[in-house]
Every structure is written in C-alpha cells, then in structure tokens.
Image: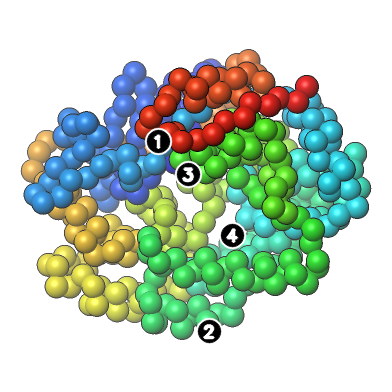
C-alpha cells in the first residue's frame, strides 16, 4: 500500500499513514505498527524484531501484509505542463482512435478522466467511460457516486455488470472471494472485455500510478525510465504521478468521492478481500445482508468451525478474506497481544489522519518534476544491486 501524507490545517505534512490487511502503519519520527482490533488499533511495534512477530508456531512478516512502496514524496507534475508533454508523446497513437476507460469514481480513475478530457482539447479521439458493477458484493451507492462524478466532468457513464444469478451461484458454491481465489475479478472484468470488443476500442485506459503497491511499482518503473505511456494497447495517463498529484487534480476539480471523506483509502466492493480490516469497519451496507449472512455461515462451518474460532470472531475480524490457516494466525496474534497493556489509537483518530489529504489544505511544497523523479529513482536502482530490485534492467531516457 501507498503511504498517504497526513496533513494539518497549516498546509504542512506532519506524517504518513497506510493501511494493509490487519495493520495500520503511522510514520512520524518513527514507525508505529498498529494491529487493528474491533474499533481501535494497538501499537505492536515492540513485538516486531527484524520485521517479524513470532506467535506460537507462526512467524508473521509484517511487511508481507502491508506491502509498502515508497517513492520520493511530494508533487511530481504541473498539470498544464504535463498535458503538453502527454500531447507530444501520445498524439500520433491515439488521434482518431477509440479509448475505453474503466471508471470507478475513485481518485485514480477520476484523475485519469480529467487528464483525458484535457487531452481532448488538443487531440481528437473518442472516449467511452464504463463502470463495471458487482451485484451483491458492492453497494448500489457506488454506481450513483461514479455517475455523479462522470456527469460533472461532462461524460455519460455506461454501466456493465455480471448477471446477479451468476454472482449468487458463485457465492453459494465458493463463498465470498478471498485472497488467492478472487472469482469476482473474472465476473467483473468479463463485461468490460465484451464492451471493449463491442465498441471496437483501440486502447484501454489504465489508471495505475507509481506508488500504489510494490508489484505495480516494479512494473511501472520500467515504463517511467522510458516515458512509455502506451504499450500493449494500454494507455496509462497517470502512471508517473504520486499520490499528492492525484489528490490535487481531483480536489481542484471538486470531484472527491465521498468514501475518501469517511477515511477510506479506496473505492471498492464491501466484500473485497484486499480491504484492510480498518476499512472493513467503515464499509457501507449493500442491501444483501441476509444473503451474505447465510454465505458467511456456510464458509464458517466449512472451513473455520473445526479451528475453534467462534463465528463472532470470524465475522468481526473479516476472516473470510483469508485461507483458514491465515485467519487462525491472526486470531492467535490478537490473543497474544491482548495479554499486555497496549497503547491504543481510536478509529476516529485514524479516520481523521486518513481523510486529511481530502479535507485539510494541501501542502505548499515544490514540484519535483519528472526529470528529478526519474533521476532519483535511477540513482536508487543503480546503487542497489540486491534485494527486491535485483535483476531489474534499467534504461534511462528522458524526453525534453
């Protein structure tokens, strides 16, 4: 996950925060690792040694569950200059072409749509904006929010969705999606692939940006060194941007998704297995609670009951997100830390920190620029010959 700046009301960054899996990380003078409980987090930093917590037979590598990616902080671009650069780099490829943007109303797809709308002032191309809704797993309000944002930016939103009976069939047979078995991805992307074929789209717009997760960072950094915005029929208009760039673009156009104001870090299904437990606490009801309750009972009886984990624990800690061995591991971790007196951080406090980039004044700090971003990452990669970046081939290319 990406560190979000924590902003105060005096236009200053006072720390960073991210949430992943069972944990919330707060970075100020030092890192504080919170294990999320029901409505608060407890500081377990003192139990972590060399990134590992040992509990009975389990060794929990915290970084594997948070997946923090760090790039130089701050702003990378001036939007007007960035649009000029994009026009220069992509005009000959997308002019008179048809593009498809999968739009959720989240910060990345919204920033992508804003940039595409500005490109249309200089480049002639068709743009279809589509939302793929996931019945039962996702609240209907997500569609309304996305429609409202798209309309405000001047676009109609085409809604696609898998048949509800098919979603019900998977839920009855497989249970909720979990890490390692996201059957929902296939059902959600299939209507988009059909739409892409139907409209004969030349390019699919991808709203990835550099710092979202480690795997994505390692993939996108190749394209950054070559300023490659288009490859394999995919156009990535925001991929070199940092989180403050994305937030600034969205806020300046007054199209902030309500979820961010509540302290959520993403727009996702209510029952997304990659939500952190902190975010599960803030999720909206989706109108199918009785059906989901039966699915949860099915999953619990099938996989968890024999592990001496109560149904209340299974629900409370959203253990449906994991394979049973992983759920058991986190229950044992909570049981272990509950024996100690721990520093607590409340849900409201974390929500305030998480939402501060959307509610407090943005920081007045210099714009780094693409050249300096590329140079800094190139220097970093060049000086690291081992570890997670080992084996990456680098080509350093900056277009003036």
Spatial separation of the CA atoms under disc 2 and disc 1: 43 Å
Spatial separation of the CA atoms under disc 4 and disc 3: 27 Å
Reading the image, the residue beneath label 1 is 388
Q: In the structure shown, which secondary structural element does the residue marked by tag 3 occupy?
A: helix
> Closer to us: mark 3 or mark 1?
1
Where does residue 336 sit, x and y in percent of width and height? Answer: 11, 46
> Closer to us: mark 4 or mark 2?
2
Identity of the residue drawn at 64% across and 47% down: 207
Where does residue 112 sit, x and y in percent of width and height? Answer: 70, 44
Reading the image, the residue beneath label 4 is 142
* Circle on res. 215: 3
* Marks 4 and 2 close (CB-CB < 8 Å): no
Q: In the structure shown, which secondary structural element does the residue marked by tag 4 occupy?
A: helix
Residue 162 visible in rendering: yes
Q: Is residue 336 left or right of residue 32?
A: left
Identity of the residue drawn at 78% across and 72% down: 198
Spatial separation of the CA atoms under disc 1 and disc 4: 36 Å
Residue 149 visible in rendering: no
Spatial separation of the CA atoms under disc 3 and disc 2: 34 Å
Answer few, some or many: residues within 10 Å of disc 4's Cα (few below 14, many 20 plus, some between 14 and 19).
many
Q: Is residue 377 left or right of residue 388?
A: right
Q: Give the mark nearest the N terminus, 1 or 4.
A: 4
Q: Give the mark nearest the N terminus, 2 or 1.
A: 2
* Marks 4 and 3 close (CB-CB < 8 Å): no
Identity of the residue drawn at 29% across and 30% down: 32
Where does residue 293 sit, x and y in percent of width and height? Answer: 35, 74
Q: In this view, does 155 lie above or below 80?
A: below
Q: Is residue 252 above or below residue 74?
A: below
Q: In this view, does 243 lie above or below 94?
A: above
């Amino acid at each position: 996950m990406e560190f979000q700046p924590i902003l105060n009301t005096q236009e200053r960054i006072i720390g960073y925060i991210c949430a992943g899996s069972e944990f919330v990380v707060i970075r100020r003078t030092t890192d504080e690792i919170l294990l999320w409980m029901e409505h608060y987090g407890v500081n377990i930093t003192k139990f972590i040694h060399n990134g590992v917590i040992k509990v009975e037979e389990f060794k929990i590598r915290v970084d594997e569950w948070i997946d923090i990616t760090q790039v130089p902080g701050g702003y990378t671009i001036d939007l007007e200059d960035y649009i000029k650069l994009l026009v220069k780099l992509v005009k000959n490829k997308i002019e008179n072409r048809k593009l498809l943007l999968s739009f959720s109303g989240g910060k990345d797809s919204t920033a992508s749509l804003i940039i595409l709308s500005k490109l249309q002032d200089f480049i002639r191309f068709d743009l279809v904006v589509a939302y793929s809704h996931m019945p039962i797993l996702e609240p209907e309000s997500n569609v309304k929010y996305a429609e409202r944002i798209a309309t405000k930016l001047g676009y109609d939103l085409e809604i696609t969705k898998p048949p509800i009976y098919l979603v019900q069939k998977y839920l009855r047979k497989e249970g909720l999606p979990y890490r390692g078995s996201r059957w929902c991805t296939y059902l959600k992307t299939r209507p988009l692939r059909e739409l892409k074929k139907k409209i004969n789209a030349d390019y699919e717009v991808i709203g990835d940006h550099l710092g979202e997760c480690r795997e994505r960072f390692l993939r996108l950094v190749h394209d950054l060194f070559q300023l490659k915005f288009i490859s394999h029929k995919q156009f990535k208009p925001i991929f070199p941007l940092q989180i403050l760039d994305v937030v600034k673009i969205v806020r300046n156009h007054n199209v902030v998704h309500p979820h961010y104001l509540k302290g959520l870090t993403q727009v996702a299904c209510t029952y997304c297995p990659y939500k952190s437990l902190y975010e599960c606490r803030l999720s909206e009801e989706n109108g199918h609670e009785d059906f989901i309750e039966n699915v949860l009972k099915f999953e619990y009886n099938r996989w968890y009951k024999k592990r001496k984990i109560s149904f209340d624990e299974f629900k409370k800690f959203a253990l449906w997100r994991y394979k049973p061995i992983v759920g058991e591991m986190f229950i044992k971790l909570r049981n272990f830390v509950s024996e100690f007196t721990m520093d607590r951080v409340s849900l409201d406090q974390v929500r305030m920190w998480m939402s501060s980039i959307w509610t407090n004044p943005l920081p007045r700090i210099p714009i780094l620029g693409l050249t300096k971003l590329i140079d800094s990452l190139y220097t970093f990669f060049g000086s690291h010959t081992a570890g997670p970046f080992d084996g990456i081939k680098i080509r350093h290319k900056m277009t003036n």
